[in-house]
Image: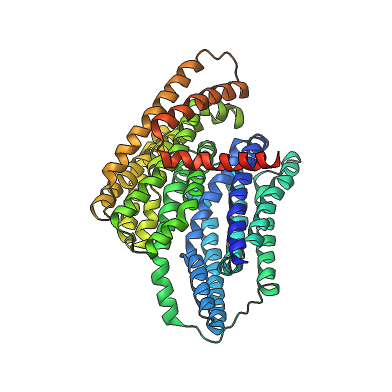
Amino acid sequence: MKKKQLKAGAILSYASLFLSSVISIAYTPFMLRLMGQSQFGLYSLTASVVGYLTILDFGFGNAIVRYTAKYRALNQRENEYNLNGMFLILYTIIGLITAVAGMILYFNTQNIFGAKMSLSEIETAKTLITLLVFNLAISFPLGIFSSIMNAYEEFVFSKVINILRIIINPCIMLPLLLLGYRAIGMVIVITILNIICLLINMWFCFAKLKIEIHFKRFDFSILSEIVGYSSYIFLGMIVDKINWSADQFILGAVAGTVAVAVYSVAAQINTYYLSFSTAISGVFLPRLTAMVAKNASDKEFSDTFIKIGRIQYVIMAYILGGFLLVGQEFVNIWAGKNYSEAFYIAAILIVPVTVPLIQNLGITILQAKNRQKFRSIVYILVAVINIGISIPLAKIYGGIGCAIGTSIGLIIGNIIIINIYYHKKINLDIPRFWKEIFIMTIPVVIAFGFAFFISYFVASSGYSSILIRGLIFTVVYIPLMWFMGMNTYEKNLFKVPFIKISRKLGLKG
């Protein structure tokens, strides 16, 4: 039964990712035009600022899953129920702290953003902050039930609820936007849907999983152990928030809501790009876990690191090349010409982030070897560099300046320093990795150059132009990568599914 839950949960995760991306791409142009740049910028800015409060989770969500699963495996029900009670108390306190932090933010909105906002924008921002903080404060204590469901490996129900929320949200929002409800209406809908989903998860835990919550014993020794486990997760959350949200905060302070709106479109494109890599690496995670259990050698880790990195590069290089080729026209049509600069911001972000994306298996290897401390320190350095460079550049170049600051931080920390660490301390064969990636880059450059040259002779415009140029790039990229870049193992990964399908169709015929 649990194996079926795991398989169905994995399939539904990819379905949710695909559906979310498709709906977001289709829905965003309407939202941008109906809300307007100022309102969208206000929403993006306040969501980004309040989003920093999510770090108050302290990484405990992951700890709930781990320790609940541990107690269930040991059949220690009383410890499990006491754990539920302890986390409910902790998260209720965190929810109250969030509310207080939100009040401080509310009363300082004028001081933080007053220089670049009108009085009406300040009042709207205060309302948005109030709603978003309320949403987050409620989400902390109610969110433990989602973690409990994961610990019980009840993936299907939670994924189905998430998919329904993805579908329902635009169905409600579009009519409201057409009626004139903008940023505030959007946040109200998001808040209501979120609370409904959290309450449904709570009902499932009590009614179906039959969980109990006990407040008999607050075990400080277990809490100390959990804090130690969660510390690196917490640190990673902080750094991620700084790296991917600081730019919007900086732009809100020095450039205004329009600059935030443009940057937010680019950030959304970057999020799509990041999700493709995560989906790909997740397929290979069970195999790596098995290697760790069998005490695999450094060479085996290197071979796996390179093998998976190559597969990711085949996909990510195709997406990157296609975006650089047709992205400008796509952004102009999709978001509108007022957001044209978002293409350059997105390009500056996704080109350097491609490297850590094709090396993200290294993070799992560090976790397996309990060597996360150095990476955490490096990523703090990245965040400091990002902010230190982005503030002055934002004043001069706006969103592009912020993107440059973020990219410089990525190159120094996530590429140069971390690659040296992987090679010198973790014993991954980084020189061989880059040698093989360089060889695979040759067909990418040829395909891109050919498609870029041919695009000058394409007379059409709009979506037809995007389709034609994308098709040219695809037709050239696939055979070049197949014959010049991919090895036998990678070819079989793509061939075997088609062979199996054709055989089944042949049998049916």
Figure quadrant of the N terminus: bottom right
Residue located 52% across and 22% down the image: 472
- Image position of 6 with respect to 361: above or below: below
Q: Where does residue 69 sit, x and y in percent of width and height?
A: 52, 72
Query: Is 367 placed above or below 409 here?
Result: below
> x, y (%) of residue 503?
62, 41
Q: Is residue 179 visible?
A: yes
Res 116 seen here: no
Q: Is residue 279 left or right of residue 205?
A: left
Residue extending farthest left: 424
Looking at the picture, tell me which residue is in the foreground, 356 or 300.
300
Query: Is 117 placed above or below 331 here?
Result: below
Q: Is residue 359 toward the left or the right of residue 125 in the image?
A: left
Q: Nearer the viewer, residue 494 or 55?
A: 494
Measuring 40% from the left and 41% from the top, which residue is drawn there? Answer: 310
Residue 202 in picture, x, y percent from top left: 66, 69
At which x and y percent is residue 164?
70, 53
- Where residue 312 sits, quadrant-wise, is top left
Q: Tell me the quadrant of the picture where the C terminus can be found.
A: top right
Which quarter of the picture shows residue 156?
A: bottom right
- Which color scheme is applied? rainbow
Is 348 left or right of 39, judged from the image as shown? left
